[in-house]
Image (cartoon, grey):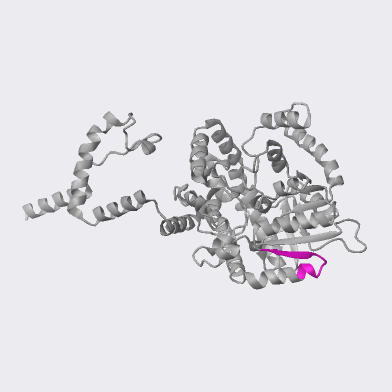
Amino acid sequence: MNPNEQFQQAATAAARDVTQRARIRKALGGYYVKRDENRDRFQNWQGARTCAAAIKDNTVAHLDTLVEQFATNIESHGAKVHWCPDAQSARDAILKIAADNKVRSVVKSKSMTSEEIHLNPALEAAGMEVLESDLGEFIMQLLGEPPFHIVFPAMHLTRGQISDLFQKKLGSEPTDSPEELTLIARRYMRQKFCEADMGISGANFGVADAGAISITENEGNARLTTSLPRIHVVLMGIEKIIPRMDDLALFLPMLATAGAGQLITCYNTLISGPRIAGEPDGPEQMHVILLDNRRTQLLADPAQRNALDCIRCGSCLNVCPIYKSIGGHSYGTTYSGPIGAAITPALSASQDWKHLSYACSLCGACSEICPLKIDLHHHLLLERRNVTQIKQAWWERWAFAGYAFLMRRQPLYTLAVKLGRLAQKFYPLVRRTPLDPLKPWTSVREFPNLAPRSFHEMWQERQAKKEHKS
């Protein structure tokens, strides 16, 4: 199946899975309460959004100089920067680092960018053992599935399902306690951290003036990933840059509030280079992979470049009625939900994902909640425009041409409405037969009846009565 067919099939199945939908809504219910509570602690949340958007807009406008500033400053601290134009070159760079240092065991902290370039299969194909150390990512790795959500990778699973998984994969005893499940994973991971030759992390932000990366987490696994192995590799998209260290005072609490409903996350770590003389711990080498992967193509589009402002908080997924109905796996992409539908076509260089922009009700909830004020539903409309400008099926061209022809000719439109009212009287006779022309629509919804009288007809009657009275 192509991605569109796969999406249609997966979304249909997920939308009918009432149990999963209930779990998603229950998980997000607690998030909404804590998000609103901590958002109210800001002196001016809307002012903070405006300020953050201005900082990122300015960053994107000067991304060329800020990325170079970041690279120069972090290299001055002992790190080595690798410029990678695409996913293949990023994988090759990491595999070369591993080969040069005879790496056999790798631990990873949470990184959606590594999912984007399909890093794990490449490392495993080269003979390396790879462990996801984020608890949610670890669960999904054991399942053999990609993350379900940008921030909460395993939010769709119950404790019982996780217990069964651990029992099958790790040989643990069954339990319904979240604390015990966490300890089972912790005991398994601890030895892996000590044995790992290389740690791979993402970066929430790259601070240009300081030449440092900022990592936000709640479990402490990223600190172990970046400090215990002898080699630390940072994989980050070039859009993760922010200009100043002072900007973190705004972005860290904003990311915590919008992403996880927290005032601040448990661990916020700044890393500027490998271990230096006199330091008790840290890696011997630090490598920074700066990934483009068509981000510069998105940057070149003035209408859509501010999609690069995204800080991957996942708040747009949490309010999207489509995402809450079909879940993350239905999209078949690294980045799901509204932000995924907006950026995936641009980052993939393929028309296979043109259907994602239509997986949207255009309710505007994503734009309203985005902490960076990204007008996401407008981006999705622009994606729909892009689709129609590139290529349309012949029947779509004829359908829209016929619609335009009809709507420009009022007498024909009036006749079509009258014929439509007549046809709807006979429609129930064919609705449940294979001959139903509207079956793709009516299989999941009621087809609305035409009004007995159109506004145009009512207006004409009103005008006729006025003239009669006069």
Position in image of residue 53 (x %, y %): 57, 63
Q: Is residue 406 left or right of residue 12?
A: left
Quadrant (top left/top right/bottom left/bottom right) for the C terminus:
bottom left
Q: Nearer the viewer, residue 171 or 240?
A: 171
Residue drawn 79% across and 52% down? 199
Position in image of residue 26 (x %, y %): 58, 36
Q: Is residue 19 left or right of residue 465?
A: right
Q: Nearer the viewer, residue 108 or 324?
A: 108
Residue 453 seen by the camera: no
Please report the bounds of the magenta region as a residue range: 73-84
Q: Is residue 422 left or right of residue 314?
A: left
Residue drawn 25% across and 55% down? 405
Q: Nearer the viewer, residue 459 or 215?
A: 215
Residue 122 seen by the camera: yes
Position in image of residue 345 (x %, y %): 53, 55
Position in image of residue 361 (x %, y %): 44, 47
